[in-house]
Image: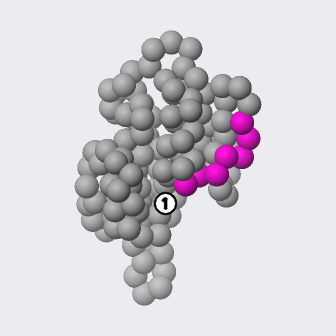
Amino acid sequence: MNIKHLGSVIIAVSNMEKSVQFYGEVIGLPIKNRRGDWAELGRDGATVILHSASRPINTGTSIENGIVVGLVVGDIESAVQELKSKKVTIHREITSHKAGKNCIVLDPDKYMISLFEPSYEGGAQQARGFHGFAPV
């Protein structure tokens, strides 16, 4: 098997309109495709796919239900300030790591969204892929 990269993250949501608004307008991922109870959002790379839950979903933490969406950002401080102004719940404030800075916010179903700003030292990116997305 020769897997090149992550293609998508599929999330069951309790309220499609509220979730499309959150990922589209609040987070800023453009809608690529939408039909019925299915929406695909994203830019280059992986796509966040939302679909209506067919049964009640666990609204506990992503640690309990197994879903964390990781997003790389250019300036985590301004991203967090923007999200706070939009009344998004901050689950964990910005923390600094060798690989970069990380923060966890919650979507409407309390799924964790991990924001990560990679560290650059001497002009070279120190972190690649999903380093720093861990929610704990």
Give the crowd class for mark 1: few <14, some 14-19, many >=20 residues within 10 Å. Answer: some
x 42%, y 31%: residue: 109
Left or right: 93 as drawn, with respect to 14: left
Residue segment shown in magenta: 28-34
Residue 115, position in %: x, y? 41, 55
Q: Is residue 30 magenta?
A: yes
Which residue is located at x 57 percent, y 47 percent?
Answer: 24
Report the side of 94 relative to 36 (left or right). Answer: left
The picture quadrant where one finds residue 57 is top left
Q: Depth check: 40 or 82 in front?
A: 82
Is 39 situated above or below 91? Answer: above
The answer to whether residue 10 of the structure is visible from this angle is: no
Q: Nearer the viewer, residue 127 or 112?
A: 112
**Which residue is at a point 71% across and 46% down the rendered structure image?**
32
Question: What's the amino acid at mark 1?
Answer: Val
Query: Would you identify the image quadrant in which residue 38 lies?
Result: top right
Quadrant for residue 48, please give it: top right
Q: Quadrant of the C terminus?
A: top left
- Residue 84 higher or lower than 135, as above or below: below
Q: Which residue is mark 1?
A: 72
